[in-house]
Amino acid sequence: MKYLLVLVSLLALTTACQKENKNNFVELFADRQKADVQKCPFDMADDVLWAPKEFVADGDNFIFVEEKLDTLLCVYNAPTQSVRRILHRGQGPDEYVVLSSVVAASDGFYAMDFVSRKSNYFDYATLTPTKDSLYLSVADTLPVSFASIGDSVRIYEVGGRDLLFYMFENKRFVSAFGDLSPYYADAESASEGVMGNFVNSEKNKRLAWASFTSDLMEIYDYSAPGSVRRVAAHRGEALQTEDGVIMGDAFMSVISLAASDDYIYALYSGKSLMDVIRETPNMEMIQLAIRKCGYILVFDWDGNPVRCLTLDNDALYVSYDHKTGKLYCLCFDNDGNYVLRLIANI
C-alpha cells in the first residue's frame, strides 16, 4: 500500500530539475566492501513466487506477501519445500483487502489489513487465523502497519498525522512519536509521502525508521514508554514535495530494512527517481524498478555507520532471521526468477 503512493506520484510528474545526490547515505561509510552473497542450502522451485512485495524469514519458514494474487500470502517451508497459499483477497470474515504488514512472533506470525483495520495471528501448524485486537480506536487514528509487537508493548505506524508512531502498553495508549516537523513544513502531508520502513529491537528497546524517498533515518529509544526519545538521526538529500506529491528530483533511498539486536541493515538505492523512469520504458514495471538496490548499509543501534556492502546484482528486499541469525535478500537469477540469497559477511 505504501509503495502505491510512490507509483501515483510518478504518474503525476511532468517536469523535474536534475541534480546530483552528493550527500547520500553511502558517503557516511569509510568501510566499504563487497557483499558475500551465497546460495541458500535449500532449493526453492522457480514457480513458487510470482510477484512478492516483501518477505519475512523465520527459521524454517519464509512468508512472502504477494499482493497481486488472489491469495495474498505464500508460506514456504524450507525442509519440506511445501508451499501454502492463504489469505484470500476480499471483504469476508477471513479475507483481506490490502495487506499492510507481516510480523513473525513465536510459532507463527501476525498480519494486518490496511482497509478493514483488522489483524490476525496465524500459527504455522494450521495457518488458521485467530482474531487479534488492534488496541487502536478507529475514530482515533488509522493504523497502517505494525511497527513492533512485544509481550506488553505495541507500536503502530500511522499516516496522515504529524507523528508517525503510536505506542500502547498493556493495551493502553502511552505515547506518540516520530515528529516530521523538523524536516518538512507540512508534517501531516509529508507523512503520507515519506512513509518508509521500520525495524525494532526488543532487547535494546529501540526502533529505527527510514524513508524510502529521501535520505532520512531516525532511531528512537522507548525503554521508558511514556517518554520516547530520539537517539540518532541521519539526513542526506531532502525529499522534495509539493502538496504531498513526490517531485522528480527526489532520490530513492532505503527500500527495505532488517535488523538484529546488534545491527540495522538498510537496503539502499540512491538512484534518481527520474533516472529510474528513463531506464524503465514499461510503466507497469516502474514499481519493481524502484525497488532494485545495489547496497546494504549496516548501522549499529546508536546510529553509527559500520560498513557498506556492495551487491553485484540488485536486490529487492532484505530480511533478518532472528531464529538462525542469517540475513537473506530477495533478488533475480540469470533467468529472471525470484531467488533467495544469503549475505554471509554481516
Image (cartoon, rainbow, N blue to C red):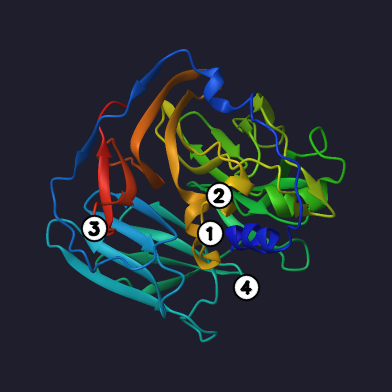
N-term mark: 3 or 1: 1
Instruction: Tell me if mark 4 has few (under 14), some (14-19) or many (20+) residues whose alpha carbon lies within 10 angstroms of its own.
Output: some
Is residue 207 something that shows in the picture?
yes
Q: Amino acid at mark 1?
A: Ile
Q: Earlier in the sequence, mark 3 or mark 2?
A: 2
Q: Amino acid at mark 3?
A: Asp
Choose top left, top right, bottom left or bottom right for residue 226.
Answer: top right
Q: What's the distance in space between the residues labelled 3 and 2, CA to CA?
A: 22 Å
Q: Earlier in the sequence, mark 2 or mark 4?
A: 4
Single out the residue that lies furthest toward the top. 30
Real-space CA distance between mark 4 and mark 3, rounded to the nearest whole angstrom: 36 Å
Q: Earlier in the sequence, mark 4 or mark 1?
A: 4
**Picture coordinates of residue 298 (x, y %)?**
44, 26
| Structural distance between the alpha carbons of marks 2 and 4 | 30 Å
Residue under pointer 3? 335
Measured Cα–Cα span from mark 1 to mark 2: 7 Å
Name the residue that disc number 1 marks: 286
Which quarter of the figure has residue 41? top left
The residue type indicated by label 2 comes to Val
Asked whether disc 4 touches disc 1, contact meaning CB atoms under 8 Å apart, the reply is no
**Of the residues under marks 4 and 3, which one precedes in the sequence?**
4
Q: Is residue 162 visible?
A: no
- For label 2, the residue is 276
Q: Which residue is mark 4?
A: 115
For image coordinates 81% across by 53% down, the residue present is 189
Q: Secondary structure at mark 2?
A: helix
